[in-house]
Amino acid sequence: MSEKISKDTVSHVASLAKLELTDKQLPYFTDQLGNIMGIFDSLNEVDTNDVEPTFSVTDQINVMREDVADNWGERDQLLKNAPDVADGLIRTPTIIDESGD
Amino acid sequence: MNFLNKDITSIHQSLVNGDITAEQLTKQAIENAKNNEKDINAFITIDEENAIKRAQEIDKRGINPDNLLSGIPVAMKDNLLTKDVLTSAGSKMLSNFKPIISGTAVNKMLDADTISIGKTNMDEFAMGSSTETSYYGRTHNPWNLDKVPGGSSGGSAASVASGDVLAALGSDTGGSIRQPAAFNGIVGMKPTYGRVSRWGLIAFASSFDQIGPLTKNVYDNALVLNHIAGHDEHDLTSSDKEVPDFTSEIDSGVKGMKIGLPKEYLGEGVSDDVREAIKSAADKYREMGADVEEVSLPHSKYGVAAYYIIAPSEASSNLQRFDGIRYGYRSENAKNLDQLYVKSRSEGFGDEVKRRIMLGTYSLSAGFFDAYFKKAAEVRTLINKDFQKVFQNYDLILTPTTPTPAFGLDEEKDPLTMYMNDILTIPVNMAGLPGMSLPAGFSNGLPIGMQLIGKPFDETTMYKAAYAFEQNTDFHKQTPKIGGDK
């Protein structure tokens, strides 16, 4: 893990996360992320053979409930938060950009 | 007379006696908040109209003499959903978002007849330790306006410390209630994971997040937790364990209590003043009849590294939902759907949120999962086992809350230095334990906080020990002179 993260990797990670970085931001974030990841190396000092990972600390395991649909009746209220609405539906740009860019 | 500088119990008495009405009290809270805003900026929204309306309703119904919270002005962190009131989480991404529901903890506070006067400032999506990453500007520390109030619940802490409200709710993922409580000289409790429903809390890192109260004193804090705790069918990680009355034995003292003082939490990086304050607190506990001994939590030092793998991983997943489609910020510059996602997110999120999303996306990405996420989760197990071992022989653990008192607003800070600030609070979230901060001294006029860590679901013992300490010290009685002696 100890190799510093490259600009190409940061660029790739940003695109996975649906973020775009400007030419100015890329070296800035690359530097910072590299520094932060530097401390991750310290975890290699710890012997974790035969140690189970902890993903959650809740004491509630597999809580079951009936799968019942509930109509909150607040469609209009909900749509008030939508950025673009037409005929009671949320509008988005075209999925495929036909202009070619 | 400023009633907001008193404790909830005595104000309740004044409300019951009719010395003051809920409306007058609420107006006073709003006036204090407004007067302090230019110096402190603790609030994103002051909800004057609704607050006064609610106060009038409560006055009309009459103050319930059996409910200490009836008519008490409070504030809510801006990542807690409040019906029809802007809930931005300190982000441009949600700068136009008005929820159609309130979260469970908020609803329980409303059911208790408290009056929320508004929504408090915070680091964007609760990611930060200084409330400097908010889209709504920085919050200032009431004890010294050139210092940070801590974070991410910096607005909640500052609003209580400034005497705007008597209690505020915050959220704590790696220290976000306790650290600002320490920096503001007040009491902040992060309950056991599962004690308070997270429904209606904008998720940051779901295996760590907990909601909790920030108050001026220990008793008030226990009072608020009484009301917000408990199982909720909307949050399946909320515990169905019975909720005791946290105030019922609060004054029973610490005689015979066994308190562990972990040597790793007083080492390098902890300032002399903070170390001295904690050692004095340990001595105070010995005086009061507790048994205080040095213990060891050897894996806690790996907490920050493990946390900054796990928490950003959970965040990167939680924050995928912000896509500019159904609610929140939408970029005007998108020509197709993919651009809509990318541009809305790139324009709507601030730098700290982007850093954490990228860190998490990286840790979870193919080829790195085992080396990062899984390794960190294994180290998390070892951190938790250290606590379990200590708690076989001890009732409580005593540490500083932060390595230093509040740092400067204009100090240059690189992200990594900021992350190290939570080194003493993060392990508690790793293990899902309850942790609280309470006033333990001063350094150059700035409050020092001490942290008590309890066994799972044993907030009762923590409140007892905290109350005993408070009764025998006067740190909590000091209040900031906002803006100095002007």
Image: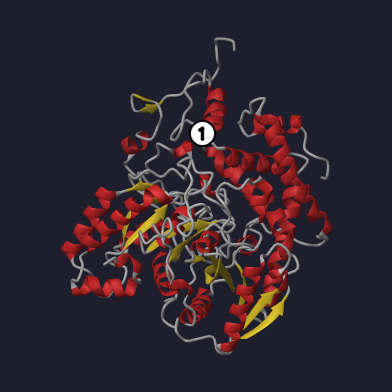
Which chain letter matches label 1? B
Residue projecting furthest to the front:
B486
Left or right: B161 in relation to A12: left
Answer yes or no: is residue B370 visible. Answer: no
The picture quadrant where one finds residue B477 is bottom left
Residue lying at 54% horizontally and 28% vertically, measured from the top left: B341
Quarter holding the C terminus of chain B is bottom left
The picture quadrant where one finds residue A28 is top right
Query: As displayed, is residue A82 above or below residue A65?
Result: above
Q: Nearer the viewer, residue B381 or A45?
A: A45
- Identify the residue position indicated by label 1 in the image: B348
Quarter holding the N terminus of chain B is bottom left
Query: As displayed, is residue B198 above or below residue B186?
Result: above
Report x, y in % for residue B373. Answer: 72, 49
Q: Secondary structure at mark 1?
A: helix
Answer yes or no: is residue B96 visible. Answer: yes
Report x, y in % for residue B414. Answer: 66, 45
Left or right: B95 in relation to B424: left
Image color mode? secondary structure
Report x, y in % for residue B191. Answer: 52, 66
Left or right: B238 in relation to A2: left
Residue lying at 51% horizontally and 21% vertically, measured from the top left: B334
Residue projecting furthest to the left:
B60
Q: Categorize mark 1 by other alpha carbons within 10 Å: few (<14), some (14-19), many (20+).
A: many
Amino acid identity at mark 1: Gly
Left or right: A100 in relation to B39: right
Q: Nearer the viewer, residue B242 or A13?
A: A13
The picture quadrant where one finds residue B243 is bottom left
Report x, y in % for residue B246. Answer: 44, 76
- Give the number of callouts: 1
Residue projecting furthest to the top:
A99
Residue lying at 49% horizontally and 46% vertically, measured from the top left: B138
